Image (cartoon, grey):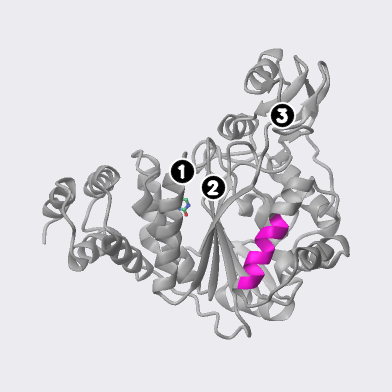
């Protein structure tokens, strides 16, 4: 076989055989297919798409390019969760201990942030001493002992995705359904959980900008999961504005703690409880909304979170430390009315400029910086009222504050917001 023939076939919109897909992906991983041919292939997929069979072949070939975790030593139904990316998304930090507090084991691998989106692993690393690297043996032992662990993606898992994701990132081929579906599902399948909850974000701050594309992505991933015997459910969730009140690593840990103490904003608290109910259902544990909420207010989920932080070397005093950012600047509303738009992408990029995110993979993070919103879309503001705070270690110019204010739209009527748009099973 020759890579050029496979690229040409896809460029012309034809369906590839399993052997062609396998030959190309394995060749890419062993270095016989160079980056420039893989980049051309990714662009051909971007424009011509892939059939269900091709996506399935691609996913399973990718799974085979690395280790596969065996979680069978952990008793019970293991559940996993994955988000396709967002701004201010601290859901895992609350959801994982909440689900684990019902006795359902959660063994989760999470990623780092890139560009306008954040990553759970970076947030956890803002806690002094917290270890995100664990051997498979220690990871399993911790889940057996305390019921949960969140670690960084193993270097040995799905080698094709590591290479391909970095290439897609610099060749404008990330936001295409076949490549996102195979990237996400190859990692979920290799990570070994029995059941998978997929959070497919939709809107300005997400890869999927409209609901129709999000539905296709969700359906594709759910079918991939089911085809290999994993119970899989996807929720389409709103990412037109940042999730919750904060963006930034330490700030999001603090918001997660507030939610775990029953002091979180109502919308994100309800959203996480709804996700928990679905995730528990995936482990055959049926709980009412009230029972799930009770685990947040009675401290059971918080206790699990603290147990995980301690088990992975984190300092429990540091966990509760406020942000040490040198400057905290109030941002005031320039007119009265209701907030109608807080574009997630713009604020994700703004937080990145403060050091809370990476423009390129090698960037260092400033864990302390970011944004806290006191008002969100649908909330009323008075003229001159503080609706957000910027946390920075550099002095903030008036120009930057004006940039921030420019992105906020205020209108005369309140708009309704719903975090979960649809559930696809
Ligand atoms: N998240 C992933 O893991 N892969 C993608 O391609 C996009 C989002």
CA gap between label 1 and label 2 equals: 7 Å
Q: Is residue 43 magenta?
A: no
Q: Secondary structure at mark 2?
A: strand
Q: Work out whether residue 306 can be spotted.
A: no
Residue 166 is situated, as x and y percent measured from the top left of the image, at 40, 48
Most foreground residue, 400 or 214:
214
Residue that carries the numbered disc 1 in the rendered image:
208
Q: Quadrant of the N terminus?
A: bottom left
Taking 129 as reference, is 122 left or right? left
Q: Residues within 10 Å of mark 2 (few under 14, many from 20)?
A: many
- The part of the image, by quadrant, that contains residue 391 is top right
Q: Residue at x 63, y 83 (%)?
A: 76
Residue that carries the numbered disc 3 in the rendered image:
414
Is 63 drawn above or below residue 162 in the view shown?
A: below
- In primary-sequence order, the first of circles 1 and 2 is 2
CA gap between label 3 and label 2 equals: 23 Å
Report the mark closest to the observer, 3 or 2. Answer: 3
Q: Residue at x 40, y 52 (%)?
A: 216
CA gap between label 1 and label 3 equals: 25 Å
User: Which stretch appears magenta?
Assistant: 272-281
Q: Which residue is most to the right?
A: 298
The overriding secondary structure of the stretch rendered in magenta is helix
Q: State if disc 2 and disc 1 touch (CB < 8 Å).
A: yes
Residue that carries the numbered disc 2 in the rendered image:
201
């Amino acid at each position: 076989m020759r890579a050029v023939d496979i690229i040409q076939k896809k460029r012309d919109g034809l369906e590839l055989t399993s052997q062609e897909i396998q030959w190309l992906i394995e060749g890419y991983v062993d270095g016989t297919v160079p980056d420039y041919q893989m980049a051309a292939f990714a662009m051909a997929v971007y424009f011509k798409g892939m059939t269900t069979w091709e996506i399935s072949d691609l996913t399973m070939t990718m799974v085979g390019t690395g280790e596969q975790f065996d979680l069978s030593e952990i008793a019970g139904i293991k559940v996993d969760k994955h988000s396709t990316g967002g701004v201010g998304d601290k859901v895992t930090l609350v959801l994982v201990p909440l689900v684990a507090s019902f006795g359902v084991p959660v063994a989760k691998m999470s990623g780092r942030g890139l560009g306008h989106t954040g990553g759970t692993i970076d947030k956890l690393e803002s806690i002094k001493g917290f270890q995100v690297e664990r051997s498979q043996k220690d990871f399993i032992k911790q889940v057996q002992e305390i019921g949960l662990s969140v670690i960084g993606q193993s270097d040995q898992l799905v080698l094709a995705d590591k290479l391909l994701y970095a290439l897609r990132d610099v060749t404008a081929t990330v936001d295409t359904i076949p490549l996102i579906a195979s990237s996400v599902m190859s990692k979920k399948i290799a990570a070994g959980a029995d059941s998978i909850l997929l959070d497919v974000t939709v809107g300005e701050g997400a890869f999927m900008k409209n609901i129709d594309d999000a539905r296709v992505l969700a359906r594709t991933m759910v079918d991939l999961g089911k085809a290999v015997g994993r119970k899989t459910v996807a929720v389409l969730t709103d990412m037109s504005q940042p999730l919750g009140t904060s963006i930034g690593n330490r700030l999001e840990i603090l918001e997660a703690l507030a939610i775990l103490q029953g002091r979180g904003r109502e919308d994100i608290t309800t959203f996480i409880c709804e996700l928990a109910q679905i995730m528990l259902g995936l482990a055959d544990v049926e709980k009412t909304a009230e029972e799930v909420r009770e685990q947040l207010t009675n401290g059971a989920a918080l206790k699990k979170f603290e147990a995980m932080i301690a088990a992975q070397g984190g300092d429990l005093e540091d966990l509760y430390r406020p942000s040490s950012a040198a400057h905290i600047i109030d941002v005031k509303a320039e007119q009265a009315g209701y907030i109608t738009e807080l574009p997630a992408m713009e604020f994700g990029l703004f937080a990145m400029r403060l050091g809370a995110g990476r423009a390129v993979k090698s960037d260092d993070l400033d864990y302390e910086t970011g944004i806290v919103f006191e008002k969100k879309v649908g909330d009323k503001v008075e003229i001159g009222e503080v609706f957000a705070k910027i946390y920075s270690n550099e002095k903030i110019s008036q120009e930057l504050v004006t940039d921030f204010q420019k992105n906020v739209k205020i209108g005369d009527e309140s708009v309704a917001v719903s975090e979960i748009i649809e559930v696809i099973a």
